[in-house]
Image: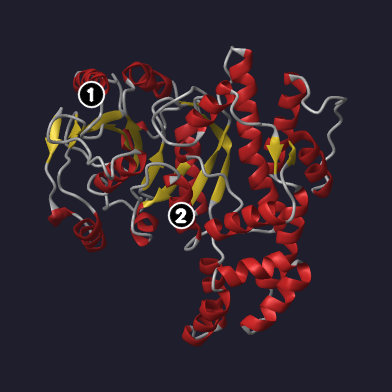
């Protein structure tokens, strides 16, 4: 492997400006040869030696149409205080990648963010910083002389992909001229029945929320799964790059992208994230599986669909063509439900909306500011506020039946129990997958 030096002279001015403002200089890329790329798959990995050994084989079975212009860039990471067994496992990964040869045109490189002097700070270290390190350095490896899209593709070391994964992503971005997207996903289903129940419940939870937002007309109705994110380099720079969050980095990154461009959905291929338990992030799939198996929570609860009815009515007014004074928005919110008005007041809507109106030069700016103010995070906070103050959580499968009816989706299941058999649970999940891909 060759350590690639950073040469700002070969980079566009906007890339140089971004790197000087947002990126660190501690880490370097190692590649099998000096080369430039159009598509870079960034894979953060901590204590993933066993998965890294099998990961290239999975990807190498893909359609090789774009292998010549693609790099798989692992970010082998650990924090300064990570246990020795984690750093030892990472050392095995680094040794493996140092000596790995794909035997074809697909390039595989890595960044060492684990060894002594290169590990990540305790305060900031985590999946967000690991993704950021990889995506920032990807900016230095693109072939900017090409007119084709320069793509950053996020994946995780424990994922599996389908044979058309790379070709569908690259062709969709270049043919449709889009800037950001998420790829369809389906968690790997474990052999163990309890684990299978756990991941089905978790994926239902994720997809139900997105379906509810879609029903309500929210512009943030897309799934936030880190291993499915794709964007072009221009959008990455425009939003200030990846954040350093230790969890939910995907949610906040996609939210920033959604404020500048539409998040499209690539439905023609699928990422299969792992369903394993994990200590790697404070919440998400791994921790949810830990929780399910520990039995500490009732995992078969979802938002009452009536919350999404309220949200739908509010969004129709808020995103309507009329621009009203803050007091009038509050009055209309109160007429939908007093707790919506209460939420807006708690979030200082009145003073902030008046500032938006006074600082906006035209209707297009106001429309943009509307989306920035009532963003994905505030949408989620309102849903949680209504859950806590209006409609508590209800049985998962009752909620699904009600939402399916609202969305005119017919599903014929002979359910007699509040928590049905695993086969029926899987049918509910399949129904949600269909709704998410409408």
Q: Which mark is residue 194?
A: none
The quarter in which the N terminus is drawn is top left
Q: What is the quadrant of residue 83 in the picture?
A: top left
In the image, 139 versus 22, the foreground residue is 22
Classed neighbour count for the residue bearing mark 2: other residues with Cα under 10 Å, few (<14), some (14–19), many (≥20): many
In the image, 232 versus 302, the foreground residue is 302
Residue 283, compared with residue 419, is above or below; it is below
Q: Residue at x 78, y 72 (%)?
A: 335
Q: CA distance from mark 1 to mark 2?
A: 36 Å
* Foreground label between 1 and 2: 1
| Residue named by callout 2 | 179
| SS state under label 2 | loop
| Residue named by callout 1 | 87
Instruction: Report the side of 313 relative to 145 (left or right).
Output: right
The quarter in which the C terminus is drawn is top right
Q: Residue at x 17, y 31 (%)?
A: 33
The colour scheme is: secondary structure
Q: Is residue 321 visible?
A: no
**Mark 1 vs mark 2: which is more N-terminal?**
1
| SS state under label 1 | helix
Classed neighbour count for the residue bearing mark 1: other residues with Cα under 10 Å, few (<14), some (14–19), many (≥20): many
Q: Residue at x 42, y 42 (%)?
A: 247
At which x and y percent is residue 386?
Answer: 68, 56
Instruction: Report the side of 413 relative to 271 (left or right).
Output: right
Q: Is residue 14 visible?
A: yes
In the image, 340 versus 319, the foreground residue is 340
At which x and y percent is residue 341?
Answer: 67, 70
Instruction: Report the side of 301 relative to 87 (left or right).
Output: right
Q: Residue at x 39, y 50 (%)?
A: 149
Total numbered labels: 2
At which x and y percent is residue 308?
Answer: 73, 54
């Amino acid at each position: 492997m060759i350590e690639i030096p950073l040469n700002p002279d070969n980079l566009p001015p906007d890339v140089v400006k971004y790197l000087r403002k947002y990126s660190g200089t501690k880490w370097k890329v190692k590649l099998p040869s000096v080369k430039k790329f159009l598509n870079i798959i960034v894979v953060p990995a901590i204590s993933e030696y066993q998965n890294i050994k099998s990961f290239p084989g999975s990807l190498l079975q893909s359609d090789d149409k774009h292998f010549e212009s693609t790099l798989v860039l692992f970010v082998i990471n650990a924090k300064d205080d990570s246990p020795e067994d984690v750093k030892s496992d990472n050392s095995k990964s680094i040794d493996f990648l140092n000596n790995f040869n794909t035997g074809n045109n697909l390039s595989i490189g890595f960044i060492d963010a684990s060894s002594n002097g290169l590990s990540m700070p305790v305060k900031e270290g985590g999946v967000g910083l690991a993704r950021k390190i990889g995506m920032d350095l990807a900016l230095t490896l693109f072939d900017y002389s090409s007119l084709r899209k320069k793509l950053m593709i996020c994946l995780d070391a424990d994922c599996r992909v389908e044979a058309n994964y790379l070709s569908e992503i690259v062709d969709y971005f270049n043919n449709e001229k889009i800037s950001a997207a998420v790829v369809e996903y389906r968690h790997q289903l474990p052999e163990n029945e309890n684990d299978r129940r756990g991941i089905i419940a978790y994926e239902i939870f994720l997809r139900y929320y997105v379906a509810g937002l879609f029903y309500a007309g929210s512009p943030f109705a897309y799934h936030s799964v880190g291993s499915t994110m794709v964007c072009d380099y221009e959008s990455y720079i425009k939003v200030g790059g990846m954040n350093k969050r230790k969890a939910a980095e995907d949610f906040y990154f996609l939210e920033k992208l959604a404020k500048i461009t539409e998040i499209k959905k690539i439905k023609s291929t699928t990422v299969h994230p792992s369903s394993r338990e994990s200590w790697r992030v404070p919440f998400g799939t791994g921790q949810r599986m830990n929780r399910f198996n520990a039995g500490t929570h009732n995992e078969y609860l979802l938002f009452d669909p009536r919350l999404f009815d309220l949200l739908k009515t509010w969004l129709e007014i808020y995103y309507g063509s009329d621009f009203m004074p803050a007091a009038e928005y509050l009055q209309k919110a109160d007429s939908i439900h007093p707790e919506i008005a209460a939420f807006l007041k708690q979030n200082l809507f009145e003073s902030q909306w008046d500032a938006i109106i006074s600082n906006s030069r035209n209707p297009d700016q106001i429309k943009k500011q509307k989306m920035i103010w009532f963003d994905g995070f505030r949408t989620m906070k309102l849903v949680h506020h209504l859950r806590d103050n209006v409609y508590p959580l209800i049985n998962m499968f009752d909620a699904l039946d009600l939402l399916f009816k609202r969305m005119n989706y017919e599903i014929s299941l002979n359910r007699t129990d509040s928590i049905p058999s695993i086969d029926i649970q899987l049918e509910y999940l399949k129904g949600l997958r269909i709704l998410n891909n409408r």
